[in-house]
Image (tube, rainbow, N blue to C red):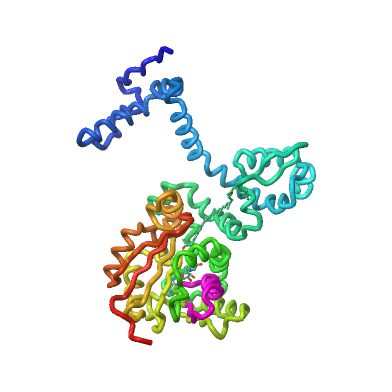
Amino acid sequence: MQLASPPAPPAGPDSAADRPDLALGQPQGWRERLAAWRDRRMADPAFRTWVLRTPLLRRVAQRRARQTFDLVAGFVYSQVLRACMELELFERLAGGPVQPAALARAVGLDEAALDRLLAAGVALKLLRWRAGGRIALGPLGAPLVGHTAIAALVEHHHALYADLADPVGLLRGPAGRPATSRQWPYTVHARPDSLAAEQVATYSGIMSASQPLIAQLVLDAYPVQRHRLMMDVGGGEGAFLRAVARQAPGLRLRLFDLPAVADRARQRFAEHGLAGRAEAVGGSFLSDSLPGGADLISLVRVVHDHDDATVRHLLRAAHAALPPGGTLLIAEPMSETPGAEAMGDAYFGLYLLAMGQGRPRSPATLRALLAEAGFVQIRQLATHLPLQTGLMVARVPGHEAAA
Ligand SMILES: CC(C)=CCC/C(C)=C/CC/C(C)=C/C=C/C(C)=C/C=C/C=C(C)/C=C/C=C(C)/C=C/C=C(C)/C=C/CC(C)(C)O
Ligand SMILES: C[S@@+](CC[C@H](N)C(=O)[O-])C[C@H]1O[C@@H](n2cnc3c(N)ncnc32)[C@H](O)[C@@H]1O
C-alpha cells in the first residue's frame, strides 16, 4: 500500500500558523523546537487532511477530532442533561422502558420535540433505545435516578451558565457582580456573620444536597473515630457531621459556621436526634477565634472559597484552636488531581472565578500553606473516586497531653 507522503509545510501568510503579528513566543532548545514543528504541522489543514487519510494515523486524528468537538459542543451536552433532569426522565424510566408517546404525554412535550431530546440523550449515553421503539435508562443515566445531589448542582448551574456566556468578560473582570457570586453571599458581604437566615438558605441547601458526593469518600479515607471531639469549620447545615455521627458513634461533634447557618445546623441536629452530641457554634473565622477543645478540625469545601490571605488566617486559627498533636483535615476539589484535572482546574477554576474569590489549589500549594501555618506531618490521602475531592491531613507539632 503506497502511503502518500505528508504535504510540505505551508509557506506564506495564508497558513493559520504563520501569523507573526500574533506570535509571542520562541521555542527554546531542541525539545521545544521539535514540539513547535509538530504544532505548526497540526495547524496546517493540508497536514490534518493527510493524517485523516493515513490508516496508521487516522484513529489518533479521529479521537482528537471527537475530543475537540466535545469541547466545542460540551455546553449543549450539559443542557441536554439539564433538560432530562428538569423533566425527571431518569425517574420516569426507573421502572423500565417506556413508549416515547407515553413519555411525551407525561412530560407535556409534543412527540417530535421529545424525540429530539431522546435522540440526544441516547447519543450521550444517558438513555438507550429498546425493542419496539421504547426508551430506557442508559449507562450514564441509571446512576442519576434520584441523585438529588447532582440534580441540585445541575439546577443551580443557571447562574454559572449566565456568567460564562462571556468568558473573556469574566476573565477581564465583569462590570457587575457575576450571578454566581450572588449565590454565595458570604463572598461579597463585609460582615458575613451578619447574613440573615434567608440569605444563607439557598446555598446551605445546595451544599447539604451535594454533601453525599463527599462525605463517605472522606470517611472511607480517614478514620475520624480515632478522635474525641471533631469540629467541622464552615460545616454548613451539618450534613457532613451527620454522616460522621453515623460512622463514629463515640465522637463528640461541633460545627462552626456563620450564625444564621449555625442556627440551621442546630435545628438539623435536633431533627436527627443529635442535639445532645453535636453543638453548632455561630461566628466568623474572619473575625472570631475558633473554639478550642477539638482534637480534629475539618475544612470541607471551605479553603478553596477564599483567597490566600484569608486561607493563611484560617489555617493559623485552626492551628491555634488545636492541641499539640491535633489534626486538621482538608477536603475539597484540588487542582492537578490525576484523572480529574478538568474537574479541578477547568470546572472549579472558572466556578471560583465566577464566585468572585478563591481558587482551586494543588496539594503542593496547600502543603506550603499548611507548613507556613505551623502544621507538620502533612500528607495527602488517596480517595477511590478522585472526582470532586482531594484530601489532606496535617498535625500540630507535639504530643497531646495524656487524656
Ligand atoms: C452490571 C452493573 C450493575 C454494572 C456494570 C458496569 C458498572 C460497574 C457501572 C458503574 C455504575 C456506577 C457505579 C456509576 C457511578 C457513577 C457516579 C458515581 C457518578 C458521579 C458523578 C458525579 C458528579 C457528576 C459530580 C458533580 C459535582 C459537581 C458538579 C460539583 C459542584 C460543586 C459545587 C458547585 C460546589 C460549590 C461550593 C463552593 C462554592 C465552590 O465552595
Ligand atoms: C461551600 S460551603 C461548604 C459547606 C460544607 N462544608 C459542605 O461541604 O457542604 C462553605 C461554608 O463556609 C461558611 N463560611 C463562609 N465564610 C465563613 C466565615 N467567615 N466564617 C464561618 N463560616 C464561613 C459558609 O456559610 C458555608 O457554610
- Compared with 241, 382 (above or below) is above
Give the magenta part as a residue range: 234-255
* Residue 26, x across and y down, in percent: 23, 35
Report whether residue 392 is seen.
yes
The quadrant in which residue 30 appears is top left
* Residue at 43 percent of width and 52 percent of height: 350
The quadrant in which residue 6 appears is top left
Residue furthest left as drawn: 29
* Residue 151, x across and y down, in percent: 61, 57
Quadrant location of the N terminus? Answer: top left
Q: Is residue 254 magenta?
A: yes
Report whether residue 199 is seen.
no
Residue furthest top as drawn: 2
Quadrant of the displayed image that contains ligand 1: bottom right
- Relative to the observer, which residue lies in front, 351 or 245? 245
* Residue 241, x across and y down, in percent: 52, 74
* Residue at 57 percent of width and 43 percent of height: 77
- Relative to the observer, which residue lies in front, 60 or 110? 60
In the visual, does 91 lie left or right of 148?
right
Q: Is residue 108 magenta?
A: no
- Relative to the observer, which residue lies in front, 157 or 231? 231
- Compared with 154, 10 (above or below) is above
Quadrant location of the C terminus? Answer: bottom left
* Residue at 52 percent of width and 75 percent of height: 248
